Image (spheres, rainbow, N blue to C red):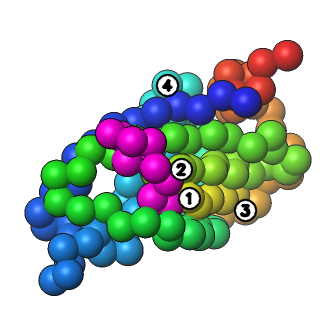
Amino acid sequence: MRWVETTTTVRFNEVDQWGITWYGHYFAWFELARMKVLEKFALLPEQFSALGFIAPVVSAQCEFKKPARTNDIITIQTHLLKPQTASLTFQFEILLQHDGSLLAKGETVQVLQKLDGTVIYKLAGTLKERVDSMVQYFWPD
């Protein structure tokens, strides 16, 4: 199983009055890492749209294990589950870089649709090629 890693620093504006990261920022970090993966396979939102598709997130969840604090350097690891339908399920782990401790883990699910919102059930053409390439990266034979 392969992961893509993204690193960032917790900024002062991301913490609450108790000095710990406000929970909503974990989803922003998931998005930061997911965009890095999608960029690698030419599947950024504007590229999806150019192919005639959208991929809205329909589910997002996060389990908080340990708080991040201002100036912590964190690593967001991203993994793609093997798709069983025309959807993309990404798993995330956020780790404190200096000791590798798990801060949070979560998942997002995107459903692939035509531009008009019609759900697609089978990938074809360029979209299929790009998604297959991403799947192969995470799940090499």
Residue at image position (85%, 50%) is: 85
Q: Which numbered disc flags the more N-terminal residue, 3 or 4?
A: 4
- Read off the residue under disc 4: 40
Q: What element does badge 4 sit on?
A: helix
Q: Amino acid at mark 4?
A: Lys
Residue at image position (39%, 42%) is: 99
Q: CA distance from mark 1 to mark 4?
A: 22 Å
Residue at image position (80%, 40%) is: 82
Q: What element does badge 1 sit on?
A: strand
59 to 29, vertically: above or below = below
- Read off the residue under disc 1: 105
Q: In this picture, which residue range is highlighted in magenta?
A: 95-104
- Read off the residue under disc 3: 118
**Residue 27 horizontal/vertical position (percent):** 43, 63
Image marks 2 and 1: residues in contact by CB distance under 8 Å: yes
In the orientation shown, which residue stands out farthest toward the top? 141
* Quadrant of the rendered image containing residue 130: top right
Q: Tell which of 45 and 71 is nearer to you.
A: 71
Confirm whether the magenta stretch covers residue 99. Answer: yes
Q: Amino acid at mark 1?
A: Lys
